[in-house]
Structures are given as C-alpha cells and as structure tokens.
Amino acid sequence: MLLPTIPTTPTTPTTFLAIGCTGFGKSTIGQLLCDVDTDVKGVASSTLCEATLFENKDGSFRYIDTAGLNDSGGLTDEDTFHNILRLLQQHSKDNIFNIHKILWFCAESVRKTANLQKEAKFIQRLSDYIDKENDRAKFWKNVLIVTKGTFPLEDLNQGPISAAYDTVKEYMDDDFENIFTVDHFPCWIFDLKPGDKKFSKMNPEDRIEMFNAYSKDEIKTALQKYVNNDSIIKIKFIKTRCKKCVETGDPRLFIDKCHPLTREKRHDIENEQYHPKPAEWQHVGKRIYRHWNQDDEVIEKPKVDSSTVGAATSTVGSLTAGAYALNIAAAAQPGIFFGGGAIAGTIALPIVAAVGLAAAGGYFVHEKIAENYKCQLCNKKYTEKGCIEECDQCNKKWDNEKGCILKHACCNKPEEESGCNWRERCLNCGETDQKLTTDGCKEYCQRCEKEWGKSEGCESNVQHDIDSDIDD
C-alpha cells in the first residue's frame, strides 16, 4: 500500500516532536520515519533526561526525541517541558520554530486515565507559545496519537482522545467543538526483532486492517499520510534577558531562581611584581677615554706641524742611507720615548744603535713620531687624555649611544627579571595600585558573591528583572 511521500525541501525540513512515556516507541519511530540514529551513548535518547534534535543526512527531516514523561528518574515533567522549549528556541529562526506534527506516544485505553489527562495537558501547554488565536484553536489538528498494540478495537483510542478533548475544553470557549480534531495511528512493528513469522506470511492489507501490524519498511509510508506541510505549528518565542542573572531567552522559560536586590562593586584583584621605574640602557663595561682614530668618522684632515714633517723626512732619509742620526728638531720634542728612556737636547746616535733600533721595530719610530700629531676633535696630542668616552665592553659612545643592556633604574636588574615591588592589579579593568581603593568595575551579588547579570541566580522565588531591549 503505497502512499505519497512528504513534500520537503532542504531549507524547510519536515519536523516531528515526539512526546510520551518511555517504552512506547518514540526513539524507534524516529529511526524508521526520519532515518536518524536516536541512540545516544548506546541507549535510546528518550531514556536520557534531555530533549535531543536529530536531523537526517540530506536535511529533509528533523526529529525531536524527548525524555519520557512520568518516569524520567528525578526529572519532573516541568523540567522536561522547559528542556523541550529551550531546545526549540535554540534552533529557532527569527524566534520561530516550525513543527509539522506532534507525535503523542501513549497507552491504548478506553478510559481517560489520570496519566493520559496529565500528558494531554502537557501537550496543550505548547499552544501557549502559538501567536495567533485561530492557530491555537486548531492546535490538535497537528497532533497524532500513536499507540502500540495489535488489538483492532476502535474503542482503544477513546481514552487519549477524550483526555485531549477535555483539555481543550478547559482552554477554549464553547465553539471549540466545531474545530477540534485529532488523528490516531495504532501500530505494531512485527519485524523489529526475530520471532513469530505469522505476520510476514499474511497479506499486508489484511495484516494492517486486522492487527495494525506493519513492517519496518511500511511504517514510514503509513505515517506520512498524516503529515501535511501546509499545516504547521509555529512556536513563537520572546527574546529577552534578565539584568540580574544569566537567564536569556523567553522569560516564560526562565528558572525560578535569581539574585536578590543586594549587590556590590569590586575589582577582580591579583597581586603582581613590578618595577617602579622603567628599564634604561646601561653599560656593563668600564668607561675609557681615547682620541679619534681612522675607524671613526672623518671630521677633517689631520693637522701636522712643519717640524714633525721635517723630522719624519730626515729620519726616513737617514735610515735609507744605512745610518741614523736623530734630527735635532725631533729629538728636541719633549716626551718622545725610545726603549723606555726620554731623549732631550741634541743627540747623535751611533749607526749601530740606529740600525738596532730599526731592526727591533721601526714601528716604534713611526709610533713615537705620531705623538706629535694632534686629535682632530680636541686638537690635543695623542699622548694626552682622550676626548672620546667609550665602554670597553661594547665599544659604544658612553653617553650618545645605547648601552650594552636594559636595566631597571629602580633595582638595577635586567629588563626580563621579575619586579622588585608588589602591587594589586584588577584583572578586568587593568587598574593598578599598591592597594586598590577605587570603586570596583564589576558588580557582584552580595549573597552568593557571583557576578551580577552573568551567573545563575542564588535565591528561589525572586522576580527576574526582564530586559527586552536586546539585539536579535
């Protein structure tokens, strides 16, 4: 028995919301109807205390499996209701979530038992989130009662239908009878587990009509006839936040705990080490003095007096002739040292001595003659105290260039070492002081000492401070 498939597009997935007690097939139908894996951590998702949205691979179906009503291990039905609505709001678009069919999984019964009435009221509460009055009146048109069993008796659906009828009667005026309708789908999936083969041998139409018995392949097609994409439940949410606690979303779903109206401002303080004074470049070597040399920037040509030039010329000529006679002008210069002794006055050295001196190092001759040159910077002789101050470690100018290392002036420690003093710093605003005494930058609840507006409430039955002026 082939039925038309549900028209879907990837942008408008057909969405089912499964509600009911554990053990009535919510997770199984999700797997067969929407081709989604409703097993979470090896167990059916409905046995967990949370609502879960599943989507098939091509995005054409979404199936919301929920915690079982009345038996979810410590989770109240109110908790379950809020979990479902919070999930829907989380996945809403422009604060609207579309549901094509609510599947109510319940027990077969000819009477409206207490549990059936409780479950019907649970489902009816969803209509409070429908914006238009007319849509709320037609709410049950989008609900499908799903019962599990092989008994074909029509009266077995009267229990849940009566429970739904009485629930709507409480919510609507007298005209509701003209528009109230709800569908019922009894079924038994006979090939989920190996067993009795009697159903597999029967004619499918007889099997379905007499025993509500479907194969896994047939159940999807059978359920699809109850879905009409033109009829949608539009769950509409309000987007707000509480100014006092962490609650955001629809205020109807806020937990009943909030912060009382007692708060204080304070800083988030941590102690840190710091240097009172900044790091400066310093030298680690000794200060030395020297005169200009050829490696320095050229300032001007060296000035040499005529007597020194004559001395140098005469000396070179004498050495070239193979004999040495010290020029009187050169010898008369005070402070000229040869071999450690000062020479003054008019002296004539033997040729042997001159040759020996030259052999020992004519270098000294030129060095001593250079003593008569003057520094280009200070015009003093090179034998006098230098005019350039340098560090003997880095060879940089002592005052005019960066030093060898960055050190803090407060404690003379290198820049990378920890501070020499302690202070308080606010982790939020960055303010620092030896002791922070200014007004705090954050507000905290005085009762629980958690941050105001960003933490869960600490007191029950405290009214939330709703702020609806928030960005979407």
Image: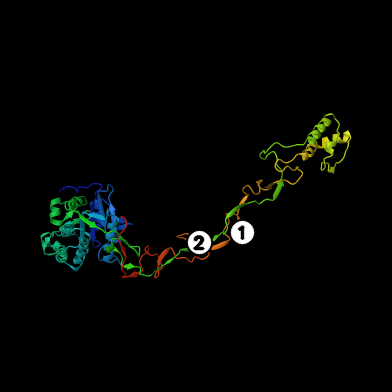
Choose top left, top right, bottom left or bottom right for residue 375: top right
- In this rendering, position of residue 252 left or right of residue 287: left
Please say if 272 is above or below 345: below
Q: What residue type is labelled 2?
A: Thr
Q: Name the residue under label 1.
A: 411
- Residue at 15%, 51% (x, y): give it: 204
Question: Is residue 198 in view from this perspective?
Answer: no
- In this rendering, position of residue 164 left or right of residue 278: left
Extreme residue toward the top, this view: 321
SS for callout 2: strand
Q: How far apart are marks 2 and 1 (CA)?
A: 20 Å
SS for callout 1: loop
- Residue at 82%, 33% (x, y): give it: 315
Image coordinates of residue 183 in percent, x first then y, are 15, 57
- Residue at 76%, 39% (x, y): give it: 373
User: Image quadrant for the C terminus?
Assistant: bottom left
Q: Mark 2 points at which residue?
A: 432
Foreground: 9 or 247? 247
Q: Which amino acid does label 1 sit on?
A: Cys
Foreground: 168 or 120? 168
Image coordinates of residue 416 in percent, x first then y, are 57, 54
Q: Which mark is residue 227?
A: none
* Mark 1 residue crowding within 10 angstroms, few (<14) / some (14–19) / many (20+): some
Foreground: 20 or 469? 469
Foreground: 128 or 369? 369
